[in-house]
Amino acid sequence: MSALRILVADDEAVTVELITVVLRHAGFEVVGVTTCFDALAKALDDPAPDVILLDALMPFLSGIEVCRRLRALERTRATPIGIFSSADEGDVRWADAGANGFLPKPFNVRNLPQFVTALAAGKPQGPPRPSTARP
C-alpha cells in the first residue's frame, strides 16, 4: 500500500514546514505550499492529493474559498479537506464550505497523523462539542 499524499497550504512557511516534517515522519507523502493559488494548482496535480489541509486565513483567497472552489470541481469534489485556523470555529464556517474537518490552532502536532488518517477514511473531524444534555 502506498503512502497517502497530503497537500498542506498555509501562508506561514514555518507552519507548512512543521506539518510537513510531522506528517512525513508518520509515513505520509507531503507537498507543502504557501499560497492559495499554489494550493489550487497542486490540488489538481497528477497524482492528486488524497487529503488536503488548508489554513482558513490566507491572503487573496482564504482557505475557505479555496475549499469552495475545489468542491465545485468534479476532480476534487470528493477529496477530503481539513481546515485549520487560529480563528474561532464558528467564525470559520468550514462545514458550510464543504470541508470534512476543522483543527483549531494551536494544535498538538502529535494529533496530526490521526486527523489526516480519519479524514482519508471519510470520518468527519472537528473539535469536541460541549454537551447540551441537562443533568
Image (cartoon, helix red, strand yellow):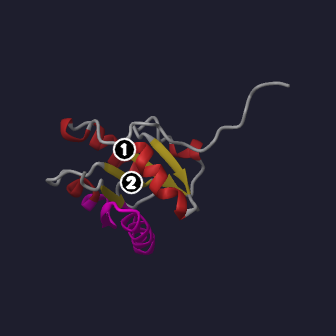
Q: If you read the primary sequence from the N terminus, does the residue marked by circle 1 or circle 2 appear first? A: 2
Q: Which residue is mark 1?
A: 120
Judged from this view, the residue extending furthest toward the front is 1
Looking at the picture, how far across and down is residue 54, in whole percent?
39, 54
Badge number at residue 45: none
Task: Give the SS element for disc 2.
Answer: strand
Looking at the picture, how far across and down is residue 94, in whole percent?
47, 42
Judge whether 84 appears above or below 93 on screen: below
Residue flagged by tag 1: what amino acid is it? Ala
Q: Quadrant of residue 34?
A: bottom left
**Residue at image location 41% in from the left, 38% down from the top:** 97
Residue flagged by tag 2: what amino acid is it? Leu
**Residue at image location 63% in from the left, 41% down from the top:** 128
Magenta-tinted stretch: 9-38
Closer-to-camera residue (48/99): 48
Is residue 119 within the magenta segment? no
Asked whether residue 62 is in view, the answer is no
Q: Marks 1 and 2: which is nearer the front?
A: 1
Q: Which residue is mark 2?
A: 53
Is residue 33 within the magenta segment? yes
Task: Give the SS element for disc 1.
Answer: helix
Q: Quadrant of residue 135?
A: top right
